[in-house]
Image (tube, rainbow, N blue to C red):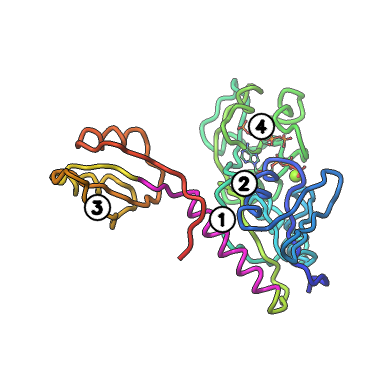
Amino acid sequence: MSQSKRLRIAIQKSGRLSKESQQLLKSCGVKFNVNEQRLIAHADNMPIDLLRVRDDDIPGLVMDGVVDLGIIGENVLEEEQIERQTLNKPSACTKLRELDFGACRLSLAVPNEFEYKDATSLEGLRIATSYPNLLRRFMQEKGINYSDCMLKGSVEVAPRAGLSDGICDLVSTGATLEANGLYETEVIYRSMACIIQSNEDQTPEKQALIDKILSRMNGVIRARESKYILLHAPTETLDQIVALLPGAENPTVLPLNDDTNRVAIHAVSSEDLFWDTMEELTALGASSILVMPIEKMMG
Ligand SMILES: Nc1ncnc2c1ncn2[C@@H]1O[C@H](COP(=O)(O)OP(=O)(O)OP(=O)(O)O)[C@@H](O)[C@H]1O
Ligand SMILES: O=P(O)(O)OC[C@H]1O[C@H](OP(=O)(O)OP(=O)(O)O)[C@H](O)[C@@H]1O
Ligand SMILES: [Mg+2]
């Protein structure tokens, strides 16, 4: 069991996940200030300490029970899990939920001039990657022999530097691949950030705090995915209009002062309302359409 009476949460110190991890915890009511130089940030209003570390260290810290929770990309989690299974080291932890940031994919990519047909085109080649275990699992499933070139960073420059024939690296917009004269050929893993918990026994107090944080996180994420929609609609197209609002089956319908042909609709929609839908609503006679963000949701 983690020795500390305070709940320990590991987050990335600086990188793609840091800002959003901190923001999510703040939205859950955890108050803290980060000092860039410090490894630990203490929360002022709850018995919680944040450990700010390299993202690669987070799964291991959770699996070894050094910290109670961690926010990490599924790609790094899965890579560490395979690594530890190979080494017979503890690799268990519990994924509490996927989060709504850190979307990326681990992909194979080759230089633009390379003629790629399918995965067998990679037979016998050298692939540069920071994810040797996920790469091996994919290549073994396809029955392809290859050699790897382990690089912790700047993987995209490996082919041009003559270090490898292709790469296996994270892609989001594809801009980095394009800038390096590479194109994506296979997606081998799709990833989001997630929150994980150590499988060590927790004291009832700490478990209660974890449950509280998780329930707040569910509320914050649900709220971020939802919108509050207000509009005026002609009674004759009411059903068609409601049908266009995503995930808002039972909206509130209110009468309008001095207008019996129109009503006001208040609805919580499970998704954003896109411009196309707004235009369809207007075509059905809707007016005064307001789409508003929701800050918190519960129950
Ligand atoms: N382009 C991207 N778009 C969205 N999410 C990404 C992107 N690249 C990476 N990620 C996610 O963010 C995580 C952290 O990426 P980052 O590039 O900050 O890692 P790093 O350089 O290994 O950082 P560290 O210094 O902590 O080891 C990745 O493991 C992945 O889950
Ligand atoms: O497809 P794109 O949108 O271009 O994103 C992909 C890039 O993003 C990540 O690196 P990051 O920018 O986080 O920097 P790093 O190389 O220092 O990790 C990843 O390692 C790729 O290099
Ligand atoms: Mg890292």
Badge 1: residue crowd in 10 Å (few <14, some 14–19, many ≥20): some
**Which is closer to the viewer, label 2 or label 3?**
3
| 227 relative position to 211: left or right | left
Q: In which quarter of the image is the N terminus?
A: bottom right
Is 219 colored magenta in this rendering?
Answer: yes
3D distance between C-alphas at marks 2 and 3? 60 Å
Q: Does 221 appear in magenta?
A: yes
Query: Which label's residue is closer to the chain start, 1 or 2?
Result: 1
Q: Residue 221: x percent and y percent? A: 52, 53
Q: Mark 1 points at which residue?
A: 98
The residue that label 4 is drawn on is 166
Label 3 sits on residue: 254
Residue closest to the far right = 37
Residue 171 at x, y = what percent? 60, 36
Q: Which of marks 1 and 2 is in front?
A: 1
Identify residue type, mark 4: Gly
Give the image quadrant in which the ligand numbered 1 is located: top right
For the C terminus, the quadrant is: bottom left
The magenta-colored residue range is 206-229
Judge from the rendering whether residue 245 lies leftward or rightward of residue 88; answer left or right: left
